[in-house]
Amino acid sequence: MKKVGKQTFNIKGDVFINDIFTIVGKKEGEGPLKDNFDLIVEDDLWGEDTWEKCELKFQKEAVKHLMDRNGLSKDGIDLLISGDLLNQIASSSFAARDLQLPYVGVYGACSTMALTLGLGALIIDGGFADNIMCVTSSHFCSAERQYRLPLEMGGQRHMSAQWTVTGSAAVWLSKSGQGPRIKNVTFGKITDLGVKDANNMGAAMAPAAYDSLKQHMDDTGIDYDLIVTGDLGTVGKSIVNKMFNENGKSIEDKYDDCGTIIYDIEKQDVHAGGSGCGCSATVLGAFLYKKLLNNEINKLLFTSTGALHSPTATLQGESIPGIAHCIGIEM
Amino acid sequence: MKYDKENYKQVVDEYTPKNKILKNCVWAFIFGGIICLLGEIIKNIFVSGFNIPENDAGPMSSVVLIALSALFTGLGWYDKLGKVGGAGTVVPITGFANSVVSPALEYKREGLVLGTAANIFKLAGPVLVYGYLSAFIVGILSLIFG
């Protein structure tokens, strides 16, 4: 069996991350990573008539650009694994309809990027596919209207609320190539410590992030150069640091969170930071992947975090289940 | 330390940034005050400029405020006012208008019947339901005791 420890799958063969294409919206394009994204779309509709159609265009264009840049044809892609935040993962399914690739749709809320990468790596390592596209997206406007309030509703956001990233990333996983390789995959357990506040997703997800990170490190024993969580924001990041410190295994000097990387928290008025499927996905493509390629780091523990929040269940008194999936990537 | 739902709540409270209540109250007072002042000015214009009786000028100035709020919502300005004004822009009648117009705008892409019409009272609905209910109860009480 290729499993190590309690929860981690060890990828014995080669699974290369050959290339990543990122597309983001205007606000993300004004943030600290503005020079690193492949494409910045200034208009929140991108020529479409609804935000939902715009979001699926993000996914579609990310895949098309990735294929064009690498001279890939549809016949060369064995599988498309994608997911997003909307009901019935509509953006992913409609993008897949237009892309006409064999498609597996997954739902992992904001943990989707790591979820698709993990599944893709296992399928390639199992010998079932050579080339897989892992894709996810989120759009501030489509997410706000589904999960919260109409956009033009005048009100104040809570200080712990986060800002959904408008963006998409397509990742090309392959059996052959060069560059960073996925070496270990840990799918997390759902961890729920009773947070019911939909304006405090970071706090809802932090226990799941801690649990998966700790499990991954216990299972593999690898000393990572950089550990990154998906979208815990300032609140969740502080809680994860506190939990590791209490266990006497501080990771503070090599730990960061994509939700605090993608925006300038103070200047861009995003309160606790970024969130959404696109958050960890675009930061991976525009920032972390490039750090690996430039040999600034050699071992990256990439962990996307998801709040599996159901507005209906919340109204019925349920809390918000958190999940985190870890992907160990090495040069 | 092992966390459970009880002790984690304390951690969350400790790390969650608090809303700036004093600042929000001051801004709400100012914005709410300005909206009400605006209503008074409109009313006085109706009374002295157009010789409209005071009893009629009151509701008429409310109608003007509602129209202005709807216009501001449509232009994408009211949510920016609301971000600073908070309760000051939510509580007056303009906030109610905003809560009707914003879903109407947002759902027009799903069609005028099942989109706009079906969702227009999504936010204002509870206010209407309990508003009518309390009016009904008060009416019954006044009938019995009045």
Image (cartoon, rainbow, N blue to C red):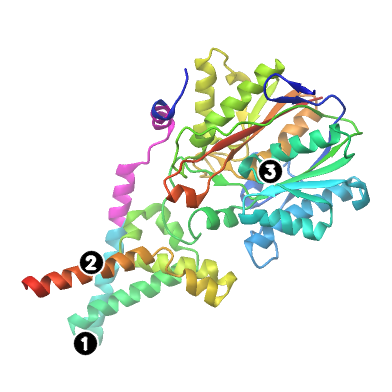
**Which label sits on residue A34?**
3
> Which amino acid type is marked by label 3?
Lys
Quadrant into which the C terminus of chain A falls: top right
Q: Residues within 10 Å of mark 2 (few under 14, many from 20)?
A: few
Quadrant into which the N terminus of chain A falls: top right
Using the image as rendered, state which of residue A88 and residue A238 is in the foreground. Answer: A88
Q: Residue at x 38, y 69 (%)?
A: B97
Q: Which residue is mark 1?
A: B51
Is disc 1 on the same chain as disc 3?
A: no
How far across and down, in percent of the image, does residue B83 sit?
A: 42, 53
Q: Main secondary structure of the magenta part?
A: helix
Q: Secondary structure at mark 2?
A: helix
Q: Which residue is mark 2?
A: B134
Above or below residue A244? Residue A274 is below
Which label sits in the foreground, 2 or 1?
A: 2
Give the distance between the C-alpha atoms of the residues marked 2 and 1, in whole angstroms: 35 Å
Q: Residue at x 70, y 20 (%)?
A: A225
Q: Is residue A45 visible?
A: no
Give the distance between the C-alpha atoms of the residues marked 2 and 3, in whole angstroms: 54 Å
Q: Which residues are magenta?
A: B8-30
Most extreme residue toward the bottom is B51
How far across and down, in percent of the image, does residue B46 sit?
A: 25, 81
